[in-house]
Image: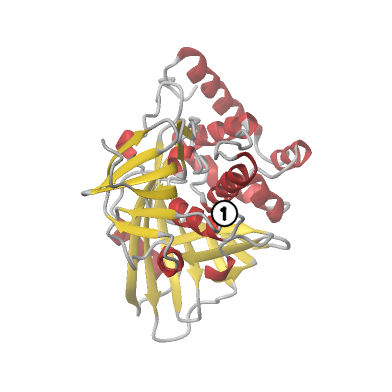
Amino acid sequence: MSDLGAQDFDYCIIGAGVSGLSLAMQMMDSALSDRAIVLIDGADDDDALRTLSFWSAKPTALDALVRHRWRTLELHGSDGPKTIELRSEQYQTLFFADLQRECKRRLLESRRHLVIEGRARSVEERDDHVLVTVGDRTLRAKWAFDSRFKRGELGVDTARWHALEQRFRGWVLRTPHDHFDPDRATLMDFRAELPAGTAFFYVLPFSKREALVELVTLIPAEPEPLFEKYLASVLGLREYEIVAQEAGVSPMTEQPFEPRSSARVRAIGIPAGRLKASTGYALTRILDDNAAIVRSLSVLGHPFERSADSSFYRALDAVMLELWEREPERVPGIFAAMFGRSPDRVLRFLDERTTLLEVLQLIAPLPPTPFIRAIGRWIARRLDGVSPSSPG
């Protein structure tokens, strides 16, 4: 590939998903604001519904885009309903389309930046730069950040690591009469007419007449009948308009991934292991990783300095995935028991921000037997390189 005629940039972001868009935003809001960025958007998803939910006790880089926040949550497990009152944390939701529009608007306002609609055909590394081709255009950048991800190319070693999938299907509903409480969201409702623990709904009301109802399953299932039955029998809702829909699949694996793709290419997002294995949440982990990239570029001149992922939390994720996979009927009771003590601490734990003492305090009320079995199966998986054939 020839360098002749290539357009020069400091940073090339390949993929305009959550990680690529938010990285561009964080770069523009940092000491790197005078650097030239090219964003390659290969997806045809402008204005498509895609909700991004997370929790935080402090401001984030995307605060201005948050659509709604909740401090009161509900959890419906095997022992009935439980109300969760958050003190420091807030559960929050934003729409991907808002992030997409705002990021592209800001990039296009500056003549130093560029947004290209199309897919990167090749990425070729040179001694001090990277060449990226998109269609008949050649782009030259000092550093490239690659968020491209295909589930079939994940490459999980299933002999050693779990490889579950969360399947999402969501509907934004509008009702003719007041029906929802916009101050109260349902975090997990396991009344989904599927084998216990293999599916749950969550409900995020944006107003008294509009809410997102999302179904999450760990097994293949036809979502529409489950959705209609849940609305009618659980929410008591029969009159409504579906104004938007979303669907997706995300991997659940504790296998570690190397963010450094090569000397001048840095993986971001899912390929960098930013999806939390046991929950499927990713946004705050992506923002933290992006912040590490910005700091590393600003201070060291390269994007590779970051804190190592915790092997302790990866082991905890592996045990939880073992339960999701082999004893899912235990999971509703486990979440109910955990949230019964300190909900804010549970969310910090799921974000890997708790001390060892806090982890022990969370684990204390949980039934030990299923965890002992899960730990035994996990150790066998790692030692033998194969999955045990029976629960044990």
Image x and y of residue 366, in percent: 67, 40
- Quadrant of the frame with the N terminus: top left
Q: Residue furthest bottom?
A: 177
Instruction: Reply above or below: 61 against 305.
Output: below
Taking depth in this image into account, of 165 and 138 the one nearest to the observer is 138
Q: Which residue is mark 1?
A: 32
Instruction: Reply above or below: 173 against 213.
Output: below
Taking depth in this image into account, of 183 and 226 the one nearest to the observer is 183
Identify the residue at horizontal 43%, vertical 39% (top origin): 271
Q: Is residue 305 left or right of residue 223?
A: right
Taking depth in this image into account, of 294 and 267 the one nearest to the observer is 294
Question: What colouring style does the render use?
Answer: secondary structure
Q: Is residue 331 left or right of residue 345?
A: left
Q: Where, by quadrant of the figure, is residue 234 drawn?
A: bottom left
Q: Residue furthest right?
A: 357
Q: Is residue 292 visible?
A: yes
Image x and y of residue 342, in percent: 73, 53
Identify the residue at horizontal 55%, vertical 28% (top origin): 374
Badge 1, how many Cα within 10 Å: few under 14, some, many 20+? some
Q: How many numbered callouts?
A: 1
Image x and y of residue 368, in percent: 65, 32
Q: Is residue 365 left or right of residue 230?
A: right
Taking depth in this image into account, of 263 and 281 the one nearest to the observer is 263
User: SS for tag 1?
Assistant: loop
Q: Is residue 144 visible?
A: no
> Which residue type carries mark 1?
Leu
Q: Residue furthest front?
A: 4
